[in-house]
Image (cartoon, helix red, strand yellow):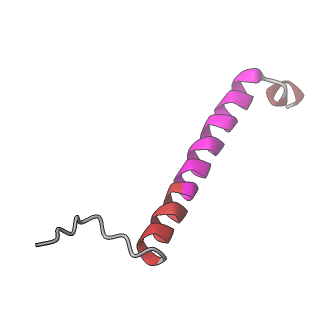
Amino acid sequence: MKTARKSPELLILLMTVASEIIWAVWLNLLNNFAIKKIDFTGTVERES
């Protein structure tokens, strides 16, 4: 088991998975903030 923990391939795999999870969480928090706090709807309001 000690050799598996020192494997650089395992470290790269874990870092890749962790970065994808962190990115998904950050994007979800950003979208929730944009929708709820600043009332972003994604539509363009045009003045007549």
Query: In the image, is 38 to the left or to the right of 44?
Result: right
Q: Nearer the viewer, residue 40 or 4?
A: 40
Q: Nearer the viewer, residue 40 or 21?
A: 40
Tally the numbered discs: 0
Query: In the image, is 37 to the left or to the right of 13?
Result: left
| Whether residue 8 is situated above or below residue 27 in the rendered picture | above
| Whether residue 41 is situated above or below residue 14 in the rendered picture | below
Tell me which segment is drawn in magenta: 8-26
Most prominent secondary structure in the magenta stretch?
A: helix
Which residue lies most toward the front here?
48
Q: Is residue 21 magenta?
A: yes
| Whether residue 28 is situated above or below residue 24 in the rendered picture | below
Which residue lies most toward the left here?
48
**Point 70% across, 23% down: residue:** 9
Q: Quadrant of residue 42?
A: bottom left
Q: Which quadrant is the N terminus positioned in?
A: top right
The x, y position of residue 29, in whole percent, is 54, 64
Q: Is residue 39 magenta?
A: no
**Point 80% across, 28% down: residue:** 4
The x, y position of residue 41, in whole percent, is 31, 70
**Point 41% across, 72% down: residue:** 35
Q: Which quadrant is the C terminus positioned in?
A: bottom left
Q: Nearer the viewer, residue 22 or 32?
A: 32
The x, y position of residue 8, in whole percent, is 76, 22
**Point 65% across, 32% down: residue:** 13
Query: In the image, is 11 to the left or to the right of 18?
Result: right
